[in-house]
Structures are given as structure tokens and as C-alpha cells.
Image: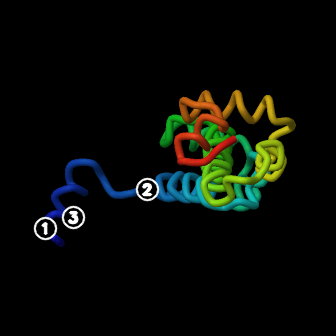
Amino acid sequence: MARLSAWVTARVGAVTDEGRQANSLADMAGANSSVVTVSDLAAALNVSQRTVHRLAAQYIGLTPHALIRRRRLQEAAEHIRSEPEVSLSVVAAAHGFSDQAHFAREFHRFLGQTPREYRGASGHHS
């Protein structure tokens, strides 16, 4: 393992502090439900919003907002799977979407189907 690590490090370089920050940014945006804005993300990482945007662009290839939105949509999809009887407007509100129509558009854009279609595909009725 040490040889492999040395070989990789020799070819791509050691992980930089900035690279570690970018990993933390991705982890925080992807797993922390309390992070709902770029400002929240910057505060959690103790860096400026500008740094958050730069790290995301340089290391991740998605905007911080897109990372947060993707997590919220994944949480909403899990909500639909775990509580198939719940109203989609309740799911939308619970995951920070301004209304059900906006939620449905974003859900479709990222997951390729509407929340109603997703619920149906999971074996549940609308």
C-alpha cells in the first residue's frame, strides 16, 4: 500500500490543503441538511463565499448551489420513497422548494422524471 501511495503521489502530487478544503466542501454540501445556502456552506467551512465558489469551480465542476440543490433533491426522493402517501406539496416545502411546480421542474431536470412518476416507479400510487 505504501508503494502504491508513493507511486500515485509521485505522478499526481500530494493532496493540497485546498484539495482537502474542496473535499470538505463536497462532503458538507452533499451530506449536511442544515446547509441550505452558499453562505451556510462558507460559514461551515470558515471561508468566504468567494472561496466556496472558487473551490467548487476548480475542484468539483459544479456550483455550490448545484451541490446543495442536488442533495435537497436526493433527500426529497428519499422522502417520497419512505413516505409514499405524503403529499408532494409537503415534500416540496419540507425540502426548501418555494412551491410544488418549482420542485417538480427541478426534480425532473435532475432525476429525469417528475416526482409523481418517481413515486409511481417506486411502486406507489399518486
Q: How many angstroms separate mark 1 from mark 3 (CA)?
A: 5 Å
Q: Nearer the viewer, residue 73 or 14?
A: 73
In the image, what residue occupies the spot 62% across and 30% down? 108
* Sequence-first tag of 2 and 3: 3
Q: How many angstroms separate mark 2 from mark 3 (CA)?
A: 15 Å
Where is 77 relative to 83, above or below? above
Q: Position of residue 28 (x, y in %)?
A: 62, 58
Q: Are marks 1 and 2 in contact (CB under 8 Å)?
A: no
In the image, what residue occupies the spot 54% across and 47% down? 123
Residue type (three-letter) at the residue carrying disc 1:
Arg
| Residue bearing mark 3 | 5
Residue 36 as seen in the image, left or right of residue 113: right
Point out which mark residue 16 bears. 2
Instruction: Give the quadrant of the C terminus.
Output: top right
Q: Characterize the local packing of mark 1: few (<14), some (14-19) or many (20 or more) Cα atoms within 10 angstroms.
A: few
Q: Position of residue 54 (x, y in %)?
A: 61, 39
Residue type (three-letter) at the residue carrying disc 3:
Ser
Q: How many angstroms separate mark 1 from mark 2 (CA)?
A: 20 Å
Residue type (three-letter) at the residue carrying disc 2:
Thr
Where is 28 relative to 55, above or below? below
- Name the secondary structure under disc 1: helix
| Residue bearing mark 1 | 3
